[in-house]
């Protein structure tokens, strides 16, 4: 699975913009899933740690936990299970529901990108270039 680092708007202004769409879905009022939460869930899946996933995104541990709690409250069950730290350290993992939600989001993202590919290519040809 590819990890996409979180970038602030200032960092994004310094880099070349990507020519892609960013999918944000709201399966119910008050429940949102977009690129940031996707990256956090994927990071937890890959690292087994909320803290490590947050660090990869340059996100504070507190903010990462807030997003995990928001996701866990928004769905019919928790998406992430965390174990307490200690001498052996803690950890986190996606639940079966978390894996399902992340996989569904990835499928929707791929389908959305495929659906707009032709129009996006046409828009790219209409953009003034600075290079």
Image (cartoon, grey):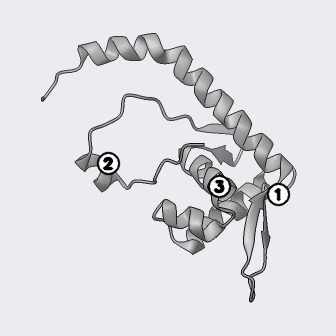
Work out whether residue 39 can be spotted.
yes
From the viewer's perspective, is residue 44 above or below residue 38?
Answer: below
Which residue does the numbered mark 1 point to in the structure image? 78
Front label number (3 vs 1):
3
Which residue does the numbered mark 2 point to in the structure image? 12
Whole-number angstrom distance, CA of label 3 to CA of label 1: 18 Å
Image location (x, y in percent) of residue 37: 60, 51
Q: Residues within 10 Å of mark 1 (few under 14, many from 20)?
A: some
Question: Which residue is at 64% across, 44% downward?
Answer: 33
Question: Which residue is at 82% across, 57% downward?
Answer: 78
Is 94 left, or right, of 49 in this rendering?
A: right
Choose between 10 and 81: the one closer to the eye: 81
Disc 2, SS: helix
Is 70 left, or right, of 83 in this rendering?
A: left
Q: Which of the two discs, 2 and 1, labels the residue nearer the N terminus?
A: 2
Is 100 left, or right, of 46 in this rendering?
A: right
Which residue does the numbered mark 3 point to in the structure image? 46
Image location (x, y in percent) of residue 63: 57, 68
View extreme (front): residue: 88
Image location (x, y in percent) of residue 6: 45, 54
């Amino acid at each position: 699975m590819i990890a996409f680092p979180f970038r602030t708007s200032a960092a994004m202004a310094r880099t070349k913009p990507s020519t892609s769409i960013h999918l944000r879905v709201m399966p119910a009022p008050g429940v949102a899933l977009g690129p940031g939460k996707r990256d956090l869930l994927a990071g937890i899946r890959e690292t087994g740690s909320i803290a490590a996933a947050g660090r990869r995104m340059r996100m504070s541990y507190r903010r990462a936990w807030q997003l995990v709690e928001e996701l866990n409250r928004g769905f019919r069950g928790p998406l992430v299970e965390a174990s307490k730290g200690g001498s052996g350290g803690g950890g986190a993992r996606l639940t079966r529901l978390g894996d399902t939600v992340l996989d569904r989001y990835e499928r929707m993202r791929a389908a959305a990108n495929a659906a707009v590919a032709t129009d996006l290519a046409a828009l790219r040809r209409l953009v003034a270039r600075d290079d």
